[in-house]
Every structure is written in C-alpha cells, then in structure tokens.
Image (spheres, rainbow, N blue to C red):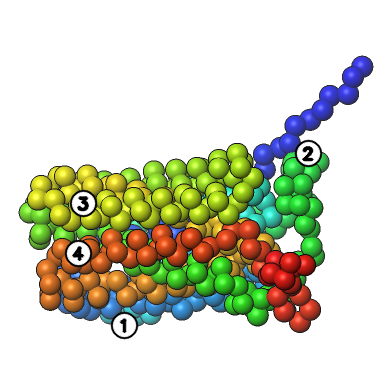
Amino acid sequence: MPQQTTGPTRVRHIVLWLTVAAYMITYMDRVVISSAVPVIQKEFGFTLVTVGWILAAFRWGYALFQIPGGWLGDRIGPRRALTLIVTWWSLFTSVTALAWNAGSMAVFRFLFGVGEAGAFPIATRSLSRWMLPTERGYAQGLTHAGSRLGAALTPPLVVFLILAYGWRTPFFVFGLLGLVWAAVWFVYYRDTPEEHASVNAAERELIQTSLGGRRPPRSKSVPWRAILSSGTLWRLSAMYALYGYCISVYLDWFPKYLHDHRGFDLKQMGFYAALPLLAGTLGDLAGGWSSDHIAKRTGNLKVARRSVAILGFLIAAGGILLATITSDPRTCVAYTCVGVFGLELTVGVSWAIPLDIGGDFAGSVSAVMNTFGNIGGAVSPALLAYLVRGYGWDVPFFVAAALCAIAAALFTGIDASDRIEAGPAGRPAVAPSGGVT
C-alpha cells in the first residue's frame, strides 16, 4: 500500500492571525480615550490644553520606549515578552478609568504608552522565525491593516458603552480583552516552529528551507554595533520618520480640516473623515501582498520591496497634491483616499524589511525604525498648527506631498537583501565581496 504524504500544517498562519489580533487591540486601546474625551472633559472640567497634555503623555511613553521594547523581545523571546507587555498595557488601559485628576490620568497614559511601545517591534520579531520571506510583506500589510481597521471600528462601540454604562466601562472592557489575548498567546505561541507541538515535519522543513537553513541559537546579546552600522537601517529610519509625519497629519488633523476649511458639518465630517482610513486599510493589504508576489515571481527581494514602496509614496504625493488644489470638498476627499491608500501601500513593505535584514534581531531593528517614525509623528501636530496659523491650510498638505516624494527618493537606497549579521564582539560580519552581509 503506497505511503501517504502529509502536506505542511499551517500553524504559522494561526500565529499570523494572533498577531493581527494584537495589532487591532493596540489601536483599539489607543482610540478608547479619544472617543471618551468629551465626557471625561465635562466630568473633570479639564481645559483643552490639559486634555492635549494627557493625550501627549501616551505619545512620549510610546516613543521613548520603542528601543527598550524591541530589545526585550530579542532578549527574552516574543512569547514571554508579548505576554508581559500586553498584560502591562491592558492593566493601564483599565486603570485609566480610576484616575482622579489630570496628573494621575497623564501618568497612567504614559505608562500605557510604555507598554504599547514594544508591541510592533516584538510582534515583528515574533514572525521572524515563522513567516516565509515571500509571505513577510503580506503578513506585515495584514497586521497593519488590522490596526487601522481596529481604530475605525472602535468609536461606535465606545460610544455605545458610554451611553449605556458610563465612560469608565470601555476602559475596563478593552483592558479585559487584552488580558484574554495575552493568555491565549502564552498558551499557543512558541518562539520557534521546532518548539511547537502542532507543527508537522513538512511545515518545519518548508520554513527552514525558505530561511536558508538558518537556525542559529538564540543569542542573549543584541548586536547593537552591527545594527547601528547598517546604512540600510538609517535610510529606512529616515524614510519612516517622513511616513510618520505624513500619516499623523491625517490621523490628528483631517477631521478638523474638513470642518474648518472644507465646510462639512459634524455629521458629514465624521463620515468623510473615515473614508481615507478605510482606503488606507486596503493599501496596507495591497502593498504587502504585491511586494511578496513580485518577490516570488522575480526572486529579487530588493526590487520587490523598493518598487512597491516607491510607487506608493509617489501615489501619495500625487493624491495629496490633487486633494489640496481642488475646490470641490467631496473631490478633495476622493483624492485624499487615493493619497492615504498610496501612503499605506508602503507600510507592509517598510515593516517587512526589518524581518528581511534583522532576522533574530528584527525586534531591535524595527524598534529603531519605529522610534524615528514616532518622532516624525510627534513633530507633526504642533508644526502643522504653526503652518496653518502662518500660511493657511494648503501649505501643510503641500509639505506632506513633498515629504512623500523625498521618502520615495530615500527608498531607492534601501536594500532588503542587506542582512545585518553580528561577527565577533558584535562587529558587522563582512561578506567576501567586502560588503556588509
């Protein structure tokens, strides 16, 4: 009787969907307070400036702890690290409801940001030993699409809970959701396919072969000298700072722009402001998928990553420019959807590259990139306000379009095949050609 061959299991896909759920929870927990601000402000009597500082506390905690968060994932492994930080930020999501004044709420939001800071770098690291190189772009696009979709779906649920049970209830509900996810992750996930009982020999072989047979022992030491010597990483980080600036323009200011400059009333504003975010969700999915498709067809990872990202930034620059110069408000929204779609087309590619070049140290590599992205995002709100005050609403969007064009130019120098390797004493390993491998 002929022996039946068993195809590879798909545990790596379950790992991916668990990671997508984590990304959704990160953005859900961020958006809870935004939807609850009017009620919180009324109860405590906070001024708008006070609310601004409370919201900024999250950004500072998030930006300052990107690299420590990524280091933690590389140091103790993503199974324990993600369990720890999701538990941490979920507790502080719930504790926000116990704040008694502005100072306590700002501290709780800062500590919430400290926990969330490691989410994307560690989640990126969690996929480094699981996803095939030709699946990485799709995986990163899917995870980031999940985050954007989570942000879009959360406000109606928060408003419903506030109306039914008060503003504190959503913080407890979403905090509990994170704790449930952390428990499921710790029980199911393993740091390597070899450690997972549900992975069969065929899937292990598929993953090992696709990674070139690389199964080095997990290092306790992160090779920071090698990481910080990577020219590709620095160009990637500069590009992502420009992306962070541009996407923050739309996350922070687009609703007010529609209301104040384009003449939409509040109800119209809420509807039309959501459309670019939904278009961006599609961009996240399309960018990662198309990059992986090109990689499979050509076998050239550098071309696959560059071509999609450059195209995305050029589409973004054109869409933003057309949206700014048109006089019709609805046409402006339509072009903005094109621009944000292009902008998000680059995200899956950007987050796939730390996996491509970082390997087991993808958490630390992506943390450096995301630190710069969040610096760009932190600069954006205040600078835009000054530009509007001095020059009107058009100039900030002209600036964003120009930054997208610069980001496209930066991507021409980003090589996804330029792997970061640690030699003796953390020195970069030099390839026979004389280049850094």
Splitting the image into 4 quarters, where does residue 257 fall?
Answer: bottom left
Residue 103, disc: 1
**Residue drawn 35% across the image and 53% down it:** 314
Give the mark, 1 or 4, whose residue is nearer the N terminus: 4
On the rendered structure, is 132 left or right of 108?
A: right
Q: CA distance from mark 1 to mark 4?
A: 18 Å
| Secondary structure beneath label 1 | helix
Considering depth in this image, is 308 or 361 the residue closer to the camera?
Answer: 308
Residue underneath mark 4: 38
Residue farthest along the right direction in this orientation:
1
Q: Position of residue 369 (x, y in %)?
A: 50, 69
| Secondary structure beneath label 3 | helix
**Residue drawn 90% across the image and 19% down it:** 2
- Looking at numbered disc 2 in the image, what kind of residue is underneath it? Ala
Residue 125, relative to residue 65: is it above or below? Answer: above
Give the mark, 3 or 1, whose residue is nearer the N terminus: 1
**Residue drawn 23% across the image and 47% down it:** 335
Q: Position of residue 277 (x, y in %)?
A: 31, 50
**Mark 3 and mark 1 residues within 8 Å of each other at the beta carbon:** no
On the rendered structure, is 270 left or right of 18?
A: left
Give the mark, 2 or 1, whose residue is nearer the N terminus: 1
Residue underneath mark 2: 202
Give the mark, 3 or 2, whose residue is nearer the N terminus: 2
